[in-house]
């Protein structure tokens, strides 16, 4: 018992968002050895802290910077699930401190190996999980990560059955994990839940531990999207964390708070330097050459997300009809108010997002309006997607809605 309460994990740093009050935990160590890993945290290090010590420091860091505890915490690494006792204590503590949305970014392995892990995470307060499914073929997965993918597939099944929101993601690696693998993954996910959220990210060879392949082309990413969306209407192609990049302008700096609570504002160049110094003993010349040739490209990030959004929008517009049902899906941040994850509304003829929101205010009262609207605008902490397209990229609240359309409200004070 004593040993349990003293469980410790290495903490590299916290990251605070400048867009919204939001904090990331960068825990060190990992049970995988992905050839293309780009996370120095996987190799351990950082400051060893108990969950209580981590909580004290994160609270202090947030109070110093935001003057309050934010609604959202993202637990990442490295691999955050390595020590269950630590992670469950951290989750419970975050919930007690007032965090509402707690997101775990994981390779899923430990969650599939331990029958009770997912249930315990949900009971401890986890609201969302992002699971990396590196490959569907066992031999590719073993070659790339050093481990079987069976526990990862099991973790996805268990999370899908739980009340934890789930996003599965795969890195597209030309010649390794490309269309054939993506198709098998999409088929597997759709067999569990056709509404599964699935994201395909491009391999970033520049900071990969081993340069196992090249960066995919835009055409390859588009094709991967087409393949995945045959099975999964919620598939997207994107890059990295789209909570921080819901719409331009992109975030360019982050506040890094080290375990001793010293603070540094870091940009992409600082992150690059951190990775370059991690990689230098392994592949210094090639990586520095690559880095010089190809700086991180925020436009690509947006164009990828934009491509999937635009394709969904056009496909739906082509199929669209006039009157009928409009499905609205709510983020967890609104479930307390809506008491449901989704709702269908009937309209005669086409309508607009604005009118849909008015109907929701009639149903859920002014509290709903105050939560998501700031005057006549959607709060920055929420995004509304119509058939996968961010309405900010169409006509905002004046965007037309037709029968059989689907509206998803995502919270970025929470969000994926
Ligand atoms: S990519 Fe993620 S799961 Fe793979 S070794 Fe790196 S930190 Fe671990």
Image (cartoon, grey):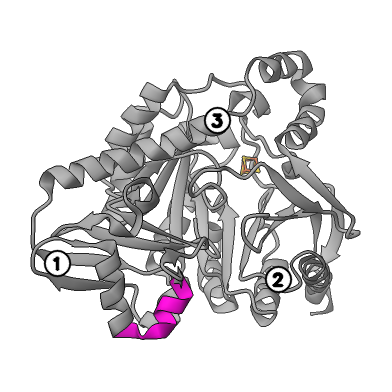
Q: CA distance from mark 3 to mark 2?
A: 33 Å
Q: CA distance from mark 1 to mark 3?
A: 47 Å
Q: Residue at x 48, y 47 (%)?
A: 247
Q: Which numbered marker is on residue 119?
A: none
Mark 3 residue crowding within 10 angstroms, few (<14) / some (14–19) / many (20+): some
Asked whether mark 1 lies closer than 8 Å to ligand 1, one says no
Q: Residue at x 27, y 52 (%)?
A: 387
Which x, y percent locates residue 296?
62, 29
Q: Residue at x 80, y 76 (%)?
A: 5
Give the mark nearer the N terminus: 3 vs 2: 2
Q: Which residue is mark 1?
A: 325
Residue 31 sits inside the magenta stretch: no
Q: Which quadrant of the figure contains the N terminus?
A: bottom right
Specify the segment rendered in magenta. Answer: 363-372
- The reply to whether discs 1 and 3 touch (Cβ–Cβ < 8 Å) is no
Q: Which of these two is toward me, 280 or 158?
A: 280
Residue 364 sits inside the magenta stretch: yes
Which x, y percent locates residue 411?
48, 64
* Camera-side mark, 2 or 1: 1
SS for tag 1?
A: strand
Q: CA distance from mark 2 to mark 1?
A: 42 Å
């Amino acid at each position: 018992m004593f040993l349990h309460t003293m469980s410790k994990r290495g903490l590299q740093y916290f990251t605070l968002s400048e867009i919204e009050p939001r904090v990331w935990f960068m825990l060190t160590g990992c049970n995988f050895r992905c050839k293309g890993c780009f996370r120095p945290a996987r190799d351990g290090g950082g400051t060893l802290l108990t969950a209580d010590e981590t909580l004290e420091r994160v609270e202090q860091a947030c109070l110093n910077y935001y003057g309050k505890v934010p609604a959202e915490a993202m637990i990442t690494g490295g691999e955050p699930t390595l020590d269950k006792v630590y992670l469950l204590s951290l989750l419970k503590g975050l919930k007690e401190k007032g965090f509402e949305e707690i997101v775990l970014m994981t390779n899923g392995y430990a969650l599939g190996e331990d029958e009770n892990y997912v249930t315990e995470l949900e009971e401890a307060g986890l609201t969302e999980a992002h699971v990396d499914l590196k490959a569907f073929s066992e031999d590719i997965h073993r070659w790339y990560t050093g481990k079987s993918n069976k526990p990862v597939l099991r973790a996805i099944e268990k999370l899908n059955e739980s009340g934890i929101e789930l996003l599965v993601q795969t890195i597209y690696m030309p010649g390794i994990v490309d269309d054939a693998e993506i198709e098998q993954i999409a088929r597997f996910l759709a067999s569990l839940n056709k509404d599964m959220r699935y994201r395909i990210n491009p391999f970033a060879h520049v900071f990969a531990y081993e340069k196992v392949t090249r960066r995919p082309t835009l055409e390859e990413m588009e094709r991967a999207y087409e393949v995945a969306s045959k099975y999964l209407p919620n598939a997207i192609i994107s890059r990295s964390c789209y909570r921080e990049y819901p719409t331009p302008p992109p975030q360019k700096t982050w506040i890094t708070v080290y375990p001793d609570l010293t603070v540094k504002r870091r940009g992409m160049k600082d992150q690059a330097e951190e990775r370059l110094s991690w990689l230098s003993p392994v592949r210094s010349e090639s990586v520095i050459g690559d880095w010089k040739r190809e700086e991180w490209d925020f436009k690509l990030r947006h164009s990828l997300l934009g491509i999937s959004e635009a394709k969904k929008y056009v496909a739906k517009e082509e199929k669209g009809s006039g009157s009928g049902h409009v499905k609205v899906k709510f983020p967890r941040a609104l479930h307390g108010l809506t008491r449901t994850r989704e709702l269908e509304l009937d309209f005669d003829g086409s309508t607009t997002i604005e009118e849909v929101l008015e109907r929701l205010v009639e149903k859920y009262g002014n509290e709903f309006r105050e939560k998501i609207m700031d005057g006549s605008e959607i709060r920055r902490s929420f995004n509304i997607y119509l058939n996968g397209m961010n309405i900010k990229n169409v006509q905002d609240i004046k965007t037309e809605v037709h029968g059989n359309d689907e509206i998803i409200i995502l919270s970025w004070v929470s969000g994926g």
